[in-house]
Amino acid sequence: MEKIPFTPQGLDVIKEELAHLKGTERQAVINAIAVAREHGDLSENAEYHAAREKQSFIEGRISELEDVTSRAEVIDADKLNGEKVTFGTSVGVVDEETDEEALYHIVGPYETDISKRMISTSSPIARAVIGKSVGDSVEVQTPGGVRSYEILSIALFDITKV
């Protein structure tokens, strides 16, 4: 069974969503189905079909999150040294062609949030920089072609500051 890397805070978010779905959302959809059934003929009851569809989505998401949490591996950032890019680090890079700088936070696939520059370990940029050190150059295959980046900085990632 393949483990899924998480920061402690990222796993907490997943567990909170799971608890919410199992508690609040599951009960709400059960109630909505019961109310829709009272309206009579189920074959032409749009409310009933919508509630059943929502129930299917919720149960699917619960199953997915239960699987994810059972395979979660929390990576302790305190054990990382910050000398090489790894899961749980922030990496500053500069595009060698445009001199545009960017900071990325390397996280697991269920914590990805591009608006916060949190990228998955499986993203092209993360795959290129993982294992590298400050001063190294890497090539990244992007939809627009190959880009070259130089690693400017590496720091331990603190999700509470994003």
Image (spheres, rainbow, N blue to C red):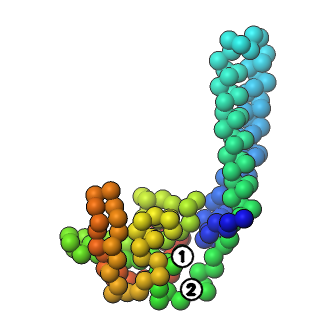
Residue placed most toward the observer, 69 or 158: 69
In the rendered image, which quarter is residue 55 located in? top right
Residue at 77% across, 37% down: 27
Mark 1: secondary structure:
loop
Estimate the x, y position of residue 67 in percent, counting from the top left: 72, 56
When the figure is inspected, residue 69 is found, relative to residue 131, above or below; the finding is above
Q: Amino acid at mark 1?
A: Gly
Residue under label 1: 88
Considering the numbered disc 2 on the image, is that residue within a helix, a strand or a loop?
loop
User: Is residue 55 at least partly visible in the picture?
Assistant: yes
Within 10 Å of the Cα at label 1, are there few (<14), some (14-19), or many (20+) other Cα atoms?
many
| Mark seen at residue 158 | none
Question: Residue 129 is drawn in which quadrant?
Answer: bottom left
Would you call the spot at circle 2 few (<14 residues within 10 Å), some (14-19), or many (20 or more)? some
Q: Residue at x 32, y 56 (%)?
A: 143
Q: Going by the picture, which residue comes out furthest to the left? A: 98
Q: Answer yes or no: do the residues labelled 2 and 1 have beta carbons within 8 Å?
A: yes
The picture places residue 113, in percent across and down from the top left corner, at 48, 59
The spot of residue 9 in percent (x, y) is 62, 68
The residue at 61%/86% (across/down) is: 79
67 horizontally vs 105: left or right: right
What residue sits 72% from the left and 65% below the top?
A: 1
Mark 2 vs mark 1: which is more N-terminal? 2
In the rendered image, residue 5, in percent from the top left (x then y), is placed at: 62, 69
- In the picture, measured across the screen, residue 2 lies left or right of residue 123, that is right
Q: Amino acid under label 2?
A: Leu
Compared with 23, 99 (above or below) is: below
Residue placed under numbered mark 2 in the picture: 80
The residues bearing labels 2 and 1 have C-alpha atoms spaced at a distance of: 8 Å
Residue 16 in view in this figure: no
